[in-house]
């Protein structure tokens, strides 16, 4: 399809589509590099070589490594959000379980998050503030949902929701690390056991 001005509309074949495909190829290769070496160890030169462009060609699509890294993380977040499902249709624990199951199918993204979250403990890391905010915001959202779950009888009423909210992400991060070390680890089974033994009222199923 061509616009009345004679220029191609986004999504059609031509320079725009070629540029978008090249941009996505750069993101895909950057994921592979960052998931292996982290942000600081990731080299734009290596990424460019893997894509088949010069470093200058790569910088035509992304102004610097920080911008490229931000796009990799953004796409990672979108995939996790899709895997979690609609909050209107799934409880917090169901969403968390769906994410754990999804992470088994995307080792590169899981490795990236594990490496970068560790790197980001350094206050000088470009993602330090972002990752700190992620954990705070995720804990605040989980705390509120856990309180609602307690009111509905789906979550043990003797838990401290603020502490339990932090523990959920701590458990998810921890079992992902174990799986990255040994892929025979069943992350979903471990998460189910955590839910059954810690979050659910006695006698309630984990799923």
Image (cartoon, grey):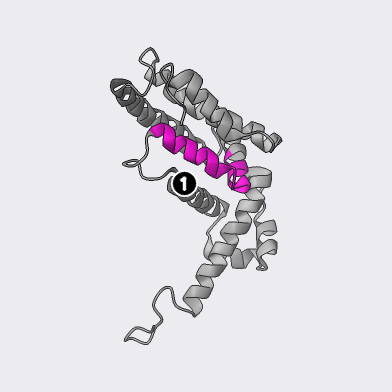
Decide which of 194, 29 is in the foreground and name it.
194
Q: Nearer the viewer, residue 51 or 177?
A: 177
Q: Residue shown at 41%/81% (left/top)? A: 8
Residue 85 location (% of width, % of height): 40, 45
Residue sitting at the far front: 203
Instruction: Kindly tell me whether residue 121 is visible in this rendering.
Output: no
Spot the residue most to the top.
158
Callout 1: helix, strand or loop?
helix
Instruction: Residue at 44%, 77% (x, y): give it.
Output: 12
State the residue in front, 68 or 117: 117
- Classify 102 as above or below 51: above
To which residue does mark 1 refer?
Answer: 83
Q: Position of residue 203 (x, y in %)?
A: 43, 18
Residue span colored magenta: 92-113
Q: Where does residue 79 sit, x and y in percent of width and height? A: 48, 50
Q: Quadrant of the N terminus?
A: bottom left
Question: Which quadrant of the figure has residue 6?
Answer: bottom left
> From what the image shows, is residue 26 above or below residue 7?
above
**Horizontal and vertical percent position of residue 127:** 51, 40
The residue under the point 60% across, 52% down is 31
In the figure, residue 45 lies in which quadrant?
bottom right
Q: Residue at x 56, y 34 (%)?
A: 188
Give the total number of marks visible in the rendering: 1
């Amino acid at each position: 399809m061509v616009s009345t001005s004679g220029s191609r509309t986004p999504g059609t074949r031509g320079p725009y589509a070629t540029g978008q495909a090249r941009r996505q190829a750069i993101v895909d290769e950057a994921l592979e590099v960052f998931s292996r070496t982290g942000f600081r160890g990731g080299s734009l030169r290596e990424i460019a070589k893997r894509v088949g462009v010069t470093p200058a060609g790569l910088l035509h699509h992304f102004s610097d490594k920080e911008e490229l890294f931000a796009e990799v993380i953004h796409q990672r977040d979108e995939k996790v959000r899709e895997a979690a499902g609609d909050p209107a249709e799934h409880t917090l624990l169901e969403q968390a379980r769906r994410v754990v199951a999804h992470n088994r199918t995307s080792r590169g993204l899981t490795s990236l998050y594990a490496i970068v979250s560790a790197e980001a403990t350094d206050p000088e890391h470009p993602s330090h503030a972002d990752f700190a905010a992620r954990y705070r915001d995720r804990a605040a959202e989980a705390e509120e949902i856990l309180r609602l779950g307690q009111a509905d009888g789906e979550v043990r009423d003797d838990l401290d929701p603020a502490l339990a909210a932090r523990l959920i992400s701590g458990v998810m991060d921890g079992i992902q690390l174990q799986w990255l070390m040994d892929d025979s680890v069943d992350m979903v089974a471990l998460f189910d056991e955590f839910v059954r033994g810690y979050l659910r009222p006695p006698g309630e199923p984990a799923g």
